[in-house]
Image: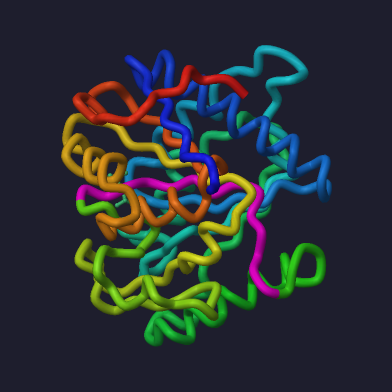
Amino acid sequence: MAKQANLYSFPSVKDNLAPALRAYVISCQDAGLARHNVFKVAVSGGSLPKTLAQALLAPSSGPNDEVKWDKWEIFFADERAVPLDHEDSNYFLLKQELLDKLPAGTTPPTVHPIDVEYLNDTQELADQYEQVLVRSFASRDSVKLPIFDLLLLGCGPDGHTCSLFPGHELLRETSAWVAPIEDSPKPPPRRVTLTLPVVTHAVRVAFVATGSGKKEIMKQIFEEGAAGGLPCAWVNEGAGERASWFVDNDAVEGVSYPRRPFSL
Ligand SMILES: O=C(O)[C@H](O)[C@@H](O)[C@H](O)[C@H](O)COP(=O)(O)O
């Protein structure tokens, strides 16, 4: 049986979680660079970009602690079907929180937003984004599924991740890499998302969940496991020890699941 997902819990987001997340992301980056001289990462929306910015915009402490932005290829784990300058856009959020704040003189990462020409048709929007992945991954890694070096995901209060919601038929998607959703329970309703097989196939999957509002859902995810039917728990089951949770103590207070001391 695959080993269990790692649960790392920290007293403070700024002082402990963010530095640990930085170290983790840099180790995934360095592994990606060693494998194929590029770091392919997909990010979610929600609170993730802000925490990520806290982690990655901190000054480097030495040669082993460098974010090599010019080697990053950034994709979106899910995206809302809105223009790229819309306040609901995950691209816009990442841009505001992180990309626009890179130190002056930084060679920017390659970023792959959705093609807004197809906003009126979410199936076409998803198909076009899948083609972006095919162009980047298929010839080099695998033709069956793309293998991201890292996925950086959030966890919703209902146990969703990306735009994969509990009980939704999208969870049964087995062939598409990117799928449309028209009835997201979290607004806005029209989105595209990586599918579950793509998520569980990544080299590493990191979840970030903070605040006491996450306590109840964290109990269900970690105590009931995949049997509870929540997308986050299915990712844990599919990815096993390749999945790591970066949470603050408030989010997992009273949750029965072994915490690991953070180490790389
Ligand atoms: O576009 C989205 O809505 C997000 O990608 C979504 O999957 C998010 O990550 C979770 O809802 C957690 O959001 P919070 O981190 O804000 O709780």
Whether residue 201 sits left or right of residue 86 in the image: it is right
Say left or right for 218 vs 172: left
Q: Quadrant of residue 138?
A: bottom right
Report whether 84 appears left or right of 249: right
Residue beneath the point at 44% across and 52% down: 237
Magenta span: 144-157
Q: Which quarter shows the C terminus?
A: top right
Is residue 123 positioned above or below 147 on the image? Answer: below
Q: Tell me if residue 130 comes above or below residue 54 in the rendering.
A: below
Residue 52 percent location from the top left of the image: 47, 35
Residue 69, compared with residue 78, is above or below; it is above
- Between 4 and 207, the one lying in front of the other is 4
Numbered circles on residues, count: 0
Residue 17, how many percent across, how many down?
Answer: 43, 22
- 260 displayed left or right of 171: right
Q: Is residue 99 visible?
A: no
Nearer to the camera, 185 or 117: 185
Tell me which corner region of the image, top left, top right, bottom left or bottom right, holds residue 10: top left
Is the magenta region chiefly helix, strand or loop? loop
Q: Position of residue 9 (x, y in %)?
A: 37, 23
Nearer to me, 34 or 78: 34
- Would you place residue 182 above or below residue 246 in this image? below
Frontmost residue, 176 versus 98: 176
Residue 118 in magenta?
no
Q: Quadrant of residue 167?
A: bottom left
Residue depicted at 18% across the width and 30% down the height: 212
